[in-house]
Amino acid sequence: MSVHLLSAVEAIQRMRIALGQPGGFDAIIDARSEDEYAFDHLPNAVNWPSLNNEERIIIGTMYKQLGGFEAQKHGAAMVAANIARHIQREVLSLPKNWQPLIYCWRGGERSGAFTHILNRIG
């Protein structure tokens, strides 16, 4: 399960292959909040939020009121706890060659955190 950054074109090409088929992805994971996922998501994506709706509001408010450093510290703790729950619930039983596509929105912080941890697993 090593991380490979893909261009949008490469990701779209691999998404055209059926899930679980050679050359395709085994899963498409949307790391955004539940509301973002409900509004719009990639076909066949599942929602594994790095921050849920409430947490996203808390961190956004903290960012505006206390600044980026405080918000990032608290956000990192929330993201780590949420990713740990997703791993315990969904990933522990998967084989080493499992290949998901993980995405979020804008800066890639949420999907980046997720991929960093999955990459550390191996």
Image (spheres, helix red, strand yellow):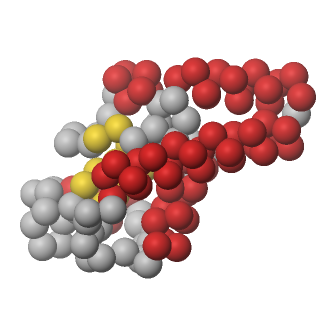
User: Which quarter shows the N terminus?
Assistant: bottom left
Q: Is residue 104 visible?
A: no
Answer left or right for 32 relative to 25.
Answer: right
Residue 79 on image: x %, y %: 59, 44
Pick the residue in front: 122 or 5. Answer: 122
Residue in the picture at 12% in, 73% down: 22
Q: Splitting the image into 4 quarters, where does residue 36 fall?
A: top left
Residue 72's place in the image compared with 101, above or below, is above
Pick the residue in front: 60 or 14. Answer: 60
Residue in the picture at 33% in, 62% down: 92
Q: Is residue 110 visible?
A: yes
Answer left or right for 25 relative to 105.
Answer: left
Residue in the picture at 22% in, 40% down: 43
Q: Splitting the image into 4 quarters, where does residue 62 fall?
A: top right
Answer left or right for 82 relative to 21.
Answer: right
User: Which quarter shows the C terminus?
Assistant: bottom left
Residue 4's place in the image compared with 90, above or below, is below
Pick the residue in front: 41 or 57. Answer: 57
Residue 95's place in the image compared with 87, above or below, is below
Residue in the picture at 58% in, 21% down: 54
Residue furthest right as drawn? 66
Residue 74 on image: x %, y %: 75, 39
Residue 82 on image: x %, y %: 52, 43
Residue 85 on image: x %, y %: 45, 46
Q: Splitting the image into 4 quarters, where does residue 95 fall?
A: bottom left
Answer left or right for 3 relative to 29.
Answer: right
